[in-house]
Image: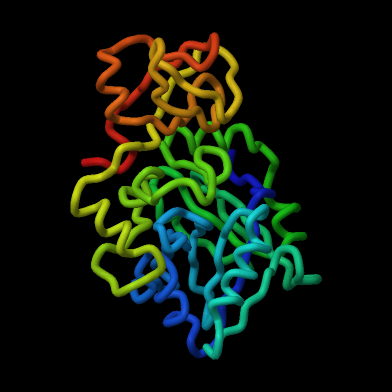
Amino acid sequence: MPAVLLTDRAVLSVSGADARHFLQGLVTCDMTKISAEAPGFGALLTPQGKILFDFLIAQDGERFLLDTSREKAADLLKRLTFYRLRAKVELANLSDDAKGDEALAVVALFGDAQAPVDALVFADPRAKALGKRAILPVAAARAFAGDARGEYEAHRIACGVPSGGLDFAYGDAFPHETNMDLLNGVAFDKGCYIGQEVVSRMQHRGLVRKRVLKVAIDGEAAPGAEIRAGEIAVGVLGGAQGGRGLATLRLDRLEDSNGAPLAAGDVQVSVLDRAPQGSP
């Protein structure tokens, strides 16, 4: 599995003289630390601190490219446009609205895979084990990368990295609940951004009640299936592949279950690691 075309991802461009400052006041990561050599992972939150959109951010010359959910890309572009006001910023969807060589796609790279020379290649900032990403013209991406999506999903799950819209619902989860604080997605030492007060309070008061954890699944269960310990509802299953999956679990209820068997319907579920990905 050297390279996989991620057809569920889209690329947005943020450029202009105020691009970095504009994003700095909106997103959870620290834009002052993002460079051509140092990509970032961040989110745009509601004022109540819940994730509306998440994305990888790579600097490409004078512009920033946001690798984000294709399903949410149009809404993200609309939201950024709403916040732009008088900032000297240009915004574009380079996956759906661009034509010809300007239309871009996202490819996941593994092992020693080498992307074409015209690709923007960067390490996935969430976890080293995830490998690298490449952003390149759609035609070149299709010719270069395969479609082994199941293998990529199994690898992502093994790395314990949640995927928005599958492992958690947009608009319904705090960054801590999706492990963004452990996956380099939240800067706690930067200035204000939308939802910062809530995120900071959760960090400093230890108010995290839910986390995405890796689980084993003995059978087939759909994403969104409720996980129970007897009569106690403890969480919700996310994506699964090859008997492994990710699940959002209530830590207090998991503790209260005293080791009782977990199940999603008739399917047995077991927690593989009660410490979320990225913990010391």
Residue 83 vertical position relative to residue 185 in the rendered view, above or below? below
In the rendered image, residue 268, in percent from the top left (x then y), is placed at 47, 11
Question: Which residue of the protein is positioned furthest toward the right in this rendering?
Answer: 100
- Residue at (40, 75) in percent of width and height: 24
Q: Is residue 215 above or below residue 197?
A: above
Task: Give the total number of marks visible in the rendering.
Answer: 0
Taking 47 as reference, is 78 left or right? right
- Residue 34 placement (x, y as % from top left): 39, 71
Instruction: Name the quadrant of the N terminus.
Output: top right
Q: Quadrant of residue 88?
A: bottom right
Please give left or right for residue 7 compared with residue 161 in the image.
right
Residue 24 seen in the current view: yes
- Rendered residue at 74%/52% (across/down): 142
Q: Is residue 19 above or below residue 57?
A: below
Left or right, 145 with reference to 265: right
Q: Give the image quarter of residue 277.
A: top left
Residue 183 drawn at (x, y percent)? 35, 50
Instruction: Give the camera-side residue of 250 and 218.
Output: 250
Residue drawn at the location 50% of the way across and 28% of the way down: 237
Residue displayed at 32% across by 10% down? 260
Residue 175 image point, x, y percent: 39, 51
186 w.r.t. 166: above or below:
below
Which is nearer the eye, 79 or 14? 79
